[in-house]
Image (cartoon, coloured by chain):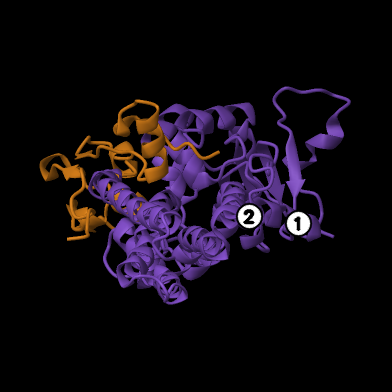
Chain colours: A orange, B purple
Amino acid sequence: MFNSYQETTVQYDKEKCVGCGRCSTVCPHRVFIQHGNKAELIAASACMECGTCQLNCPADAITVDSGVGCAGSMIRAALRGEKLDKANCTCE
Amino acid sequence: MSKQQSCDCTNTKTNTEVPNKSLPEIRPTTWSTGNAELKDHILARLGVYRLNHRVDPGLYSLGKPTPKSPAFVSANYTLSFDMLRSSLKHTDAYILVLDTQGVNVWCAAGKGTFGTDELVSKIQTTNLADVVSHRKLILPQLGASGVNSFEVEKQSGFKVEYGPVRTNDLPEYLKTGKATPEMRQVKYTLKDRLVLIPVELSVAALPLIVAVIALDILGGVLPASAVAVSVLAGTALFPAVLPWLPTRDFSSKGFTLGILLALPFADSAFLGNSGSAIWLQVALGLAYVFLMAPITAYLALNFTGSTTFTSRTGVKKEIFRYIPAMAASLVVGAVLAALVIAMHFLGGGI
């Protein structure tokens, strides 16, 4: 109840991981940690879906449906008749 | 004063009589920031000329850098650039400023302007490879959402190293060559939230003033101050007290705050009409709660975009879960208020 933030879209394929450690370096919310020569996805619910890990993964081991967690931009998109998922960061 | 280096690339400005394409323009900058910067930072925080707090993109020299000095990358937003250079006190360095159109590092990375292409292009146009002898760039960690570090290395030969999230951890990072997990985590402190309030307020100010004046004329001081309190609660108080409000969702936090602040108004409305029928007193009191709470809750939900941690999946869920509740609450409140007003005109006793 009253927690809409338990599920996120981050997905990790450990098989593909080459152990470079970039994801645990770039993630601002410690969603990944480096454990030996593999990354571990330890806190998926803390993910803010910024997509940084996916962009910086050289092995395509991570996917995130990334976007801006901003109600204002989504509501504005809805009012324009667009899909909520299409909302971009609209503050200047 | 220190002597000029034998190969002093910072000195190119004086070589203008021999135009040489291979010599990039390097602008000098300082560690210290003064009153002009302070004034600019205050205006930026107030949201005045929001996109005009810019520095020229390009390469800067900080102190007296040599070809071995570290090279940092920043955005052409004054707050970003000034925070970086003032955190590097006594470090001789180069700063490569990307053209992010006056937007800070994290937001610009999200928009893609602090990105792989812009970084590679600035490395080339400033001839950075001729200025420094190493091939390492230190980027702010939050720039990583726009930069594919492996792609940058492939295209430019420069290895990307992500520094800490906050510039004030840079001295420690430079000493140890490593950012601790603590330095890598984004926080959202009271101070981080408080500095956002002026911009939140400036967005809400005009409609709020209009609403307050209109309600004051139509209904008097109590409804006028009720709308002022619910809007100020959602824009100014909510950011301050965010972590201490119960539940995780912004909307439910906002409803809680809105209901709490509506109670004194409900109470005054109830007591101020003690001559009326009791059900009319109750209806008017409840109208304040049903009308004020969703205003605060809606503004609270909108604050998600100013935070450092909300996911799109979660915010989308919040919108579908709570917007109908907010609308329903407004309708109930409006019906109750209309009922009371109608009874008033029909001589029902208020």
Say left or right for B226 vs B277: right
- Point out residue B295 in the picture as x, y percentages from the top left corner: 41, 54
The kind of secondary structure element at disc 1 is helix
The image quadrant where one finds the N terminus of chain B is: bottom right
Asked if labels 1 and 2 touch by Cβ distance under 8 angstroms, the answer is no
Q: Are marks 2 and 1 on the same chain?
A: yes
Three-letter residue code for mark 1:
Lys
- Point out residue B175 in the picture as x, y percentages from the top left corner: 51, 66
- Point out residue A1 in the picture as x, y percentages from the top left corner: 17, 61
Above-or-below relation of B237 to A13: below
- For disc 2, the neighbor class at 10 Å (few under 14, some 14 to 19, many from 20) is some
As rendered, which of B299 and B30 lies closer to the eye? B299
Q: Residue at x 81, y 22 (%)?
A: B19
Q: How many marks?
A: 2
Label 1 is found on which chain of the structure?
A: B
- The residue carrying mark 1 is B39
- The residue carrying mark 2 is B45
Above-or-below relation of A56 to B19: below
- Point out residue A37 in the picture as x, y percentages from the top left corner: 19, 52
Q: CA distance from mark 2 to mark 1?
A: 10 Å
**Residue sitting at the far front:** B347
Label 2 is found on which chain of the structure?
A: B
In the picture, residue B347 is in which quadrant?
Answer: bottom left
